[in-house]
Amino acid sequence: MADLRSVIERLIRRHALLRADPPLPTVLVVGEQALAAVDRLAKPFETAVPYARVTDGAHESVLDLVSSLAGDDDHTGKTHADRGRLGKPVGGSLLPPPRFPLVQFVLWTRERPDGRVPDPQSHTDYQAYKKRLKDWRRGMAGGGGDDVKTSADFLARAATTWVPVGTLAVWWAGGAADLVGVVPWLLGLLVALGGTAAQGVLSIRGSLFTGWFSSEPSLKRRRFERLPQYALRLAAAPDDDIEELLVHALMQDLHEAYKKWIIPWPSWGRGQYCLLVLQITDPDGTNARFLRLMEEITKKTGLFVPMLVLAAVPGGVPPAQAAPKPLRDLEEAVAQWRKVARLGVPELRLTVEAAALPAEPQDDPSPPRRRRAMAYWTVMALLVIVPLSLVYVIQRDRAGHCGGLLWVERIEDECVGIVNAKRDTPETLFEGDVKKLVKKIDENNRYAIESRRYISVVLFGEFTIKKTAQDDTRLAAAVSELAAVEEYQRTVTSTPRLRVLIANAGDNFDHGRRTAQLIIDMAEQNRDVMGVVGLPRSVAGISEAIRELHLAKIPMVSSTATADRFGYISNPGLPDQPGEPSPYYFQVGPTNVRQATLGARFARRTLVPDVGEPIAVIVEDRSQGDVYTLNLADDFAKALTDEGADVERISYTVQQGGISSAAGKACGLDPDVLVYAGRAAEFRAFLTAVEGNACGEVKVIAGDDVVKVVSDHGDEIANTKQAEVYYLALAHRALWPRSSATAFVSKLQMKRCGRLDTNEPPTKDPLCAGLPDK
């Protein structure tokens, strides 16, 4: 004899995930031993699947029978043993039991607490049902007992859908640079919580499912009919119609419990179908009517219930269908037959005879099949964890690229790289005059791009200067360079137009190498990039950038860098050699050796021509990474020595201070000439220290970095009592008003200086230093 247990087990076992659920048979067991045989077949699975056993005569009506299968508690926490047996939790299944919102709604409408049939046309009854519906829904959400668990279950289901949607909102909102930070997360949290709450409430209240009543064929909910009015109509409907509606609702609820929803739902994890055991001893009894209604609804609608029915029919098989239709309804009968044929409903009855009892099953209940449920919960966990983790990584990457800028990286608190390569520069990156000028450059870029005939150049500068001293010229130099570029870009009339890409190398060009690497990456994808301009200071960061850009064969033009061997590329095989000048690097400003040679010649032949061997003391800044100051000091030392001076050198560093001490030591050497080879920020402190150390009358020569300080504090410097101050400049002030000045320079002067045929007040911009007033 075949293993009957395995046969039943195969019937209730659900197919693989991607396969459709097949129709399940209604197994009719006839014969003298039918009742006992059915019980033995079902016994191993009583605790493994949603299970119910209904003895014949136990229920007076189909309404009572359906209530025993899918009814609800009374929302007070009190459990009714004879209610909702198919909805009881299955121990060890790892899944919530099937829910029956449609059945429970219909059962609720038939409770009739006052014992009378309500009038659907009565406004009083309508108001009463409206209030009752509100109270019932409130009780479903938190009435106690299993209701709270049900609410938590529906909220958890909703969360697995809306948390991923919320993470998508974070990703979408994070696309805007001005939203990077907490705002995208707040938006994502709002979407996730709002969606979870909305879907959860709709599920708990049943609103997510009650739309089915609008398509139910027997007692259809009318269009625009309010739910309390529909409930009132159901309360007054005939019992036969309600019974058919209840059975149909039961089948639909089970269908929803096993349906493969497009959103995460426990139905994906259910690995076994429900099991219902029916005893049918009376062919006209409640159980037999229930079975016939199920079969008729399946034939009418094509809805297969995901439940194996084992029916013990010791007295023989009950009629398979309702009474024949009268001849006058032939047309209706033909239409119904054609519908059944179109739906392809197979014969669901499977009749077997139990002439003898099957073997007593061993005391070994079948355990719930949990593999599919574990896979479901794994997917649910991943749906929550993976999107959150992914959006965290994306947001972290976006923040690391300063709002998703492709060729920008956030290093510490600076955004380093090309800030306007793909779109306008984000508003939050820069401040003050830098922000205003960059915005104008972006506007000019749009005009250039719209012309479709343009070339791109990269302006390499330091535009996020963290902290500036009073006389620090770095910010003023950066603003001046941006202003000059913007003026030229806006006023040029020839084609191709000029598109300017802003490359920020960080404070003091500390991230020059990385910025150059980002420029190289961008240039590989943008063939219209012609080269790099700017590179204004002789510091280590720019020197490293030049080496990177040289290897990529990208042309470079430095505006004001002056170190002698800037742009020389060393040979790794010859570390002791200075290397060769890069053929891709061009330097506009004069080199330090030219400045030093002219400065030394001026000092010896003009300032101290009558001193036989003048003493020249060089006060030099030896701050790490500043190529300019050390190189300028070396060049002055050689040039002054060549001019016959006795040269001494005193050093200090910006990081450790010591400018006053260095000035005091220099004065102690009784110099004829003091050479300042430092940066502008310390120049006034140096002069103050010279005045305070009783140097006597001494000549001071400074490098080109102090031009703006002299322009800003000219009167103060001119009034020093001991020091007679001179400084070197990259171009003599006498060159500016000459007729040979270009139209661009003249326009820039007019715009920046507020002079030259304008009525604007003068400014202390370095571009304007030395210009005569009209």
Image (spheres, rainbow, N blue to C red):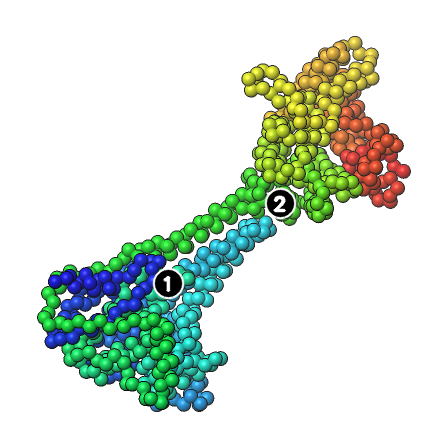
Residue nearest the viewer, comparing 681 with 331 = 331
Amino acid residing under circle 1: Lys
Res 56 quadrant in image: bottom left
741 displayed left or right of 390: right
Find residue 335 and report its horizontal and vertical position in percent.
38, 80
Horizontally, residue 148 falls left or right of residue 392, namely: left
Q: In the image, what residue occupies the spot 64% across and 37% down?
A: 527
Q: Does residue 653 appear to the left or right of 375 in the view shown? A: right
Q: Earlier in the sequence, mark 1 or mark 2?
A: 1
The quadrant in which residue 430 appears is top right
Q: Position of residue 22 (x, y in %)?
A: 30, 65
Q: Given the current orientation, which residue lies at the most extreme top position?
A: 612
Which residue is pictured at 24% across the width and 60% down the height? Answer: 368
Q: Quadrant of the N terminus?
A: bottom left
Please name the residue that numbered disc 2 is placed on. Answer: 422
Q: Amino acid at mark 2?
A: Lys
Residue 278 occupies quadrant: bottom left
Tell me the SS state at disc 1: loop
